[in-house]
Image (tube, rainbow, N blue to C red):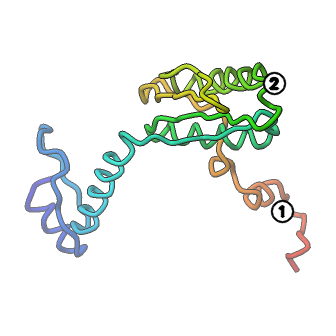
Amino acid sequence: MKLSDALRRAQELGLDLVEVAANANPPVCRIVDFGKFKYEAAKQDKEKKNSSSKLKEIKFRVNIDEHDYMTKMRHGEDFLDKGNKVRVQLQFRGREMAHQELGMALMVRVKTDLSTMAHVEMEPKLMGKSVTMTLAPLPQNKRKRHFQSDHDLPSLEDSDKAGKDDGEEDENDE
């Protein structure tokens, strides 16, 4: 499209013509609201700067329940997916110190479960009454999520509507 045509079209829509890729041949432009475009670009830059060097922490106990474990794994994957490092901390209380092998087994399980998203930067080591391990994210193209987060699942309302036939009526439909 010619420059004059693009400018005329942008003016008709009440928007701006913004050059997106100046180095391309021919240069690439979009018709958008310039203020909104600048805001989105600033938001993306800020997000990149913030997530590059943060250290997030996940705390475990030796006798963690399966559901709680899965929730913490999903959070760990979210942190790693955003490019953050993750410190996994296992805390012992009282007589739990007598069974340190259970704690180390849990740390090995965490390490293997998150192996598709991260590599171990610091191996699990006992310091006082806690075991600490640090995980660093893999490169973006090598990450593979193992645990699906809640917001990735389809909502129950959508699945109810999709499963209903045209002839059937719901209690709410009258």
Question: In the rendered view, would you say 28 is above or below 96?
Answer: below
Identified by mark 2, the residue type is Ala
- Given residues 64 and 83, the one toward you in this image is 64
The picture quadrant where one finds residue 172 is bottom right
State the mark number for residue 99. Answer: none
Q: Nearer the viewer, mark 1 or mark 2?
A: 2
| Separation (CA) of disc 1 from disc 2 | 62 Å
Residue 14 locus on image (x, y percent): 22, 75
Residue 94 locus on image (x, y percent): 79, 37
Q: Looking at the image, tell me whether mark 1 or mark 2 is earlier in sequence order.
A: 2
SS at circle 1: loop
Q: How many marks?
A: 2
Residue 50 locus on image (x, y percent): 35, 48
Q: What residue is pinned by disc 2?
A: 98
Q: Quadrant of the C terminus?
A: bottom right
Q: What residue is pinned by disc 1?
A: 166
- Given residues 159 and 78, the one toward you in this image is 78
Question: In the rendered view, would you say 97 is above or below 42?
Answer: above
